[in-house]
Amino acid sequence: MSPAPKRSATAASEPTTGRLLAAFGALYVIWGSTYLAIRFAIETLPPLLMASARFLVTGSLLYVWARSRGAPRPTRSQWKSAVVVGGLLFVAGNGSVVVSEQWVASGLVALLVASVPLWMVVLDWLWGSGLRPSRRVVSGLLLGFAGVAFLAGGPGTGVEDARQLVGSILVVLGSLAWAGGSIYARHADVPYRPRLWVGMQMLAGGVLLLPVAVAAGELARFEPAGVSLGSALALAYLIVFGSLVAFSAYIWLLGVSTPARVGTYAYVNPVVALFLGWALAGEPLTFRSMVAAAIIVGSVALITTERPRAGT
């Protein structure tokens, strides 16, 4: 989503084992738990309004923090890029997640979102770098989409309830939009400072979500007095831990570890989400979902662990 910062002299020094474990733990557990936190947040908060509030607050904090640390003022061209990327990632991508979790279990949503790396390979091949995927990547793609198809045919994704089917389709389309936004960002005019860039994306996404929420009738139905303590705490968790803490760990790890190791969160998060949903929210953990998880996670591992080909 953001360009990896260059390693500084400080970052290049060997980090302690404790800090590495804490940072990877934040990526694995915190980001994996955000799907369940969203479920709790939307119990009494309108989904799109909740997401808008989350990204407006987090984006503002990241933007102010980056500017206070010397990041230059973004140009108009960079703000245009932030609007496009923020719309694809946080309106279409995350918006589909928060809406779908009204009907689809959080763990199953996380498994469907795990298809993002698969879509990124396809979109990058067709409209990005034009680099033809290797046999290993093609195998991973076929395996991954087979896993998604296998999951989509099981309980909780549309077999019993048409709303579940709609929610599952929304997540797949949202994952495609997230991948498209990520590919677009590679070639767009963006600021070098990662925290500034993500803050801009979140601010743009939060603003764009507001009219979508109004059009969906959420503002008219919203009753502040009806918001439960659990939903409020879940939203606070998403802002503080899901966005600020975990993202700070992500940025730090990009400077002290390899992209391949940092990228392992892509296939750990859905497994964490699946088990947290089962343990803390009573969501179904079926044999079919576990097999689908193994297939999807395995496919993402095949793709993300491939070494770059010589001459590319």
Image: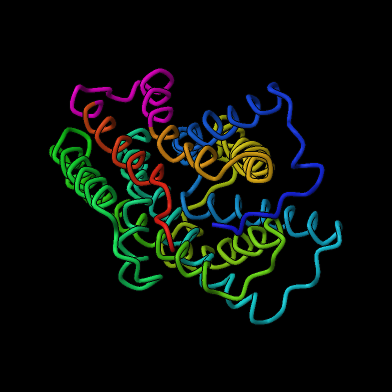
Q: Position of residue 173 (x, y in %)?
A: 31, 58
* Pick the front one: 144 or 11: 11
Q: Position of residue 207 (x, y in %)?
A: 59, 66
Answer above or below: position of 197 versus 58.
Answer: below
The span picked out in magenta is: 271-290
Tell me, yes or no, whether the highlighted magenta stretch contains residue 303. no
Tell me, yes or no, whether the highlighted magenta stretch contains residue 275. yes
Instruction: Tell me if 143 is positioned left or right of 12 in this view.
Output: left
* Pick the front one: 114 or 167: 114
Q: As drawn, which residue projects farthest toward the front?
A: 310
Q: As drawn, which residue projects farthest toward the bottom?
A: 76
Q: Position of residue 40 (x, y in %)?
A: 48, 33
Residue at left offset 56%, top offset 30%: 230
Q: As drawn, which residue projects farthest toward the top?
A: 279
Residue at left offset 58%, top offset 61%: 206
Residue at left offset 72%, top offset 61%: 193
Answer above or below: position of 289 versus 50.
Answer: above
| Residue 271 can be seen in this image | yes
Instruction: Tell me if 242 is positioned left or right of 129 in this view.
Output: right
* Colour theme: rainbow
Answer above or below: position of 34 versus 71.
Answer: above
Instruction: Tell me if 294 is positioned left or right of 90 in this view.
Output: left
Residue at left offset 54%, top offset 57%: 1
Q: Which of the 4 image quadrants contains residue 305?
A: top left
Instruction: Tell me if 244 is positioned left or right of 208 in this view.
Output: right
Q: Position of residue 161 (x, y in %)?
A: 17, 41
Please tell me whether the stretch drawn in magenta is mainly helix, strand or loop. Answer: helix
* Pick the front one: 45 or 157: 157
| Residue 163 can be seen in this image | no
- Quadrant containing the C terminus in the rendered view: bottom left
Give the number of marks.
Answer: 0
